Amino acid sequence: MLTAALPVEVLPEPDASHAGEVLIELGIILLVLAGLGRLAARIGIPSIPLYLLAGVLMGDGGFIPVSAGEEFLEVGAEIGVVLLLLLLGLEYSPQDLRNGLRSNWVAGLVDGLANAVPGFAVGLMMGWSLTASLLLAGVTYISSSGIIARLLDDFDRVANRETPVLLSLLVMEDIVMAVFLPIMAVLLVGATFVQGAVAAGIALGLVVMAFVVSMKFSEKVSRLVHSHSRELLLLTVLGLTFLVAGLADAVQVSAAVGAFLLGLTLSGQVADDVRSLMPPLRDVFGGLFFVFFGLTIDPRDLVPVLLPALALAIVTALTKIFTGVFAARRNGIGPKGQWRTGLSLIPRGEFSIVIAGLGVAAGAQAQLGPFAAAYVLILAVTGSLLMRFADRIPMPVKLRGQSSWPGSRTTAPPLASAGAPPGAPEVRKPLA
Amino acid sequence: MDIYETPLPGIGVRYEFQSESGDHVGVVVRRDGKRDFALYDREDPDSCKGTVELSEGDASKVAELLGGTNITARLDSLRHMVEGLAIEWIAMPASGGLTDRTIGDGRIRTETSASVVAVIRGDTGIPGPDPDFTLRGGDTVLVMGSTDAVRQATTILTG
C-alpha cells in the first residue's frame, strides 16, 4: 500500500497493523501542517493556502503518497468542514445579521454583482455547466471572513472607522451564503425541475426556520444546550452539530449547509460557549479539510488552470477594491480608509474552498477543484499582503483628490448622558 | 461630551469620543471582554495611531485609575457646594452594631436625619438599599448628612 518513499518502510515490522499505518500517516500530516503553520506565521500570511498546497503536493501525483489514512482523512475532512461552517454561522449574532441587512444592503448588492459575475462568466467561457459556473461565482464572490478578521486584529485595525463598513459587507456575504449554499446543494443533486423546486423549497424553509429560531427562541435553545461542565457542553454541541449536519445531508441539503444554519441558530450564551470551546477542534479538523481538498487535486491539473485562475484573481481583486471603496465612501470614510477597505476585501479562503468542495464532492466539474485551489492560493496570499501594506500602496489619483474629513459617520446617535460605559457600577470605593 | 456607539459584527462594540484637547479616542469592547483602547490619527482620522489591548482585569484597573479619582473629586465638590455636608464610608464590624440586622432596625433616618445612600458588599455596589436590607460584617456603608448626624449614625451602625 505504501511506496518506498515513506518512513513506514524503515519500521522493523514490514506489515505494521492498519491502525498503526493510519496513525503514522496522520502524525506526519499533522506535523507538516504544524510546520507550515509556523512558517505562515513567520512570514505573515494566513495558513490556509499553505495547508492547501501541502494537500496538493501529497497524494496522487504528488511527492508524499497518502493511502492508509485516506478513509479517516475523508471523515476528518467532513468533520472539518462541518465545524468550519458551524463557527462561520456563529460569527455573527442575529442582531448583526438584521442590522447588516438593514443598513448596507446596497453595498452588499454591489459586492454580489461585481464579484460573482466575473466568476460566473469565466465558468461559462471555459465551457462549464451552469451549476459549475454558479459555484465558481460563489468562489469569487465570497471574501474570507476568517482571514480578514484575523488580519484586522494582527494589524491593529479593529478600532478603525472603516472597519464597521468592512464587517458589514462580510455579514451580508454570510447572509447570502445562507441562501446560496442550500440552493447549490439542491442544484448539484441534478434533480428534475419539480424535485429541484421541492428540495429548494425545503432548503429555503430550513433557512427561514433557522433565522426564526435564532431570533425568537435563542434563550430557550441556550438553556437547553448550556452546561457548566466543558465536557458535557462539548458532547452536547458536537452531538447536536453532527446530528443536524447528518440530517441535512440525508435530505440532500449537504452537511456543511446544515452546520452553517445551526451556527446561525445558536446565539447568546451558548454561542459564546461554543466560540470559546470549538476553535481548537475546528483548527485541527479544518486543517485536515484543506489538506484533503488538496489531496483530491493532482498537481499536474493545476498547470492548465493557472493562467485563467490568475486572470480571474486579478479581475476579482479589482472588483473587490471597487466594492470596498464604494461601500466606504457611502459611509463617509476618507480616501485612505476607502483604499484600505477595498484592499482588505481581497483575501478569499475557507468559504471559497467549501463551495468548490461541494462541487467536487458532487462531481460537477473536474476542473473546479484545481481552479478554486489555484485561485484561493493566489488571493489568500496576495490579498493578505495587500491588506498588510495597504497604507504604503499608493492610491489611485482619483481617490486622493477628495477631502480627508468624513462628512458623515456610520455611528449611532450619541448615547444619552454617557459618562460611563453601560453596566459600570455606579458606586465605587474611594481610592484612599 | 458625546460618545458614539458603533456595533462591530463578530467582534463587539466600538465607543468613540473626542476629548476636549481635540484627540479622537476609541474603545472597542470585545465579545470576550477584552478592550482595545485606540487613539485616532489626526492626519488620517479613519485609522488609529496606536492601540492598546487590555484584558478585562487591565481595563478595570485603568478605569479605577481614571474614574476613581474622578468620583472622590466629585464628592469633594459636592461637599463644597453644601456647607456642613458629611459623607462617610463606614465598615461594618464582624458582629455588634447593626451587623446581621436590617437598616430599618437602626432607625438611622428617624433618629439622626442622616441617610444610608449605598452599601458596598464585596465587589458590588448596592445604591439606595431598602429599609429591610440586612447588613453583614465587612459591608461598607455610605452615609450622608450633617456632620453630627453622620457621627451618630456611625455609632448606631458600628455599635
Image (spheres, rainbow, N blue to C red):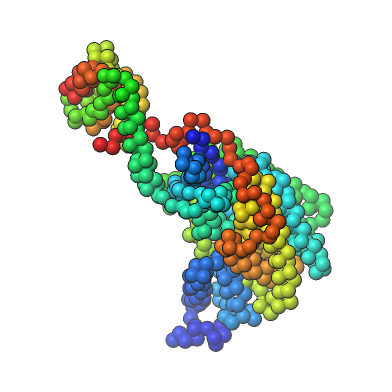
Indicate the position of residue B38 as horizontal and vertical percent values: 47, 49
* Above or below, comparing residue A288 to residue B72 in the picture: below
Indicate the position of residue A76 as horizontal and vertical percent values: 56, 65
Which residue sits at x=54%, y=63%? Answer: A285
Indicate the position of residue A10 as horizontal and vertical percent values: 47, 86
Toward which corner of the image does residue A212 lie, by quadrant? top right
Residue in the foreground of this view, choosing between A129 and B143 = B143
Residue in the foreground of this view, choosing between A176 and A323 = A323
Residue in the foreground of this view, choosing between A239 and B73 = B73
Which residue sits at x=58%, y=63%? Answer: A392
Quadrant housing the N terminus of chain A: bottom right
Toward which corner of the image does residue B99 lie, by quadrant? top left
Indicate the position of residue A378 as horizontal and vertical percent values: 65, 69
Which residue sits at x=57%, y=80%? Answer: A64
Quadrant housing the C terminus of chain A: top left
Q: Is residue A351 visible?
A: no
| Count of numbered circles on the image | 0
In-image side of A395 versus B62 (left or right): right
In-image side of A113 versus B135 (left or right): right
* Above or below, comparing residue B103 to residue B45 in the picture: above
Residue in the foreground of this view, choosing between B140 and A52 = B140
Q: Is residue B148 visible?
A: yes
Which residue sits at x=26%, y=22%? Answer: B86
Toward which corner of the image does residue B142 lie, by quadrant? top left
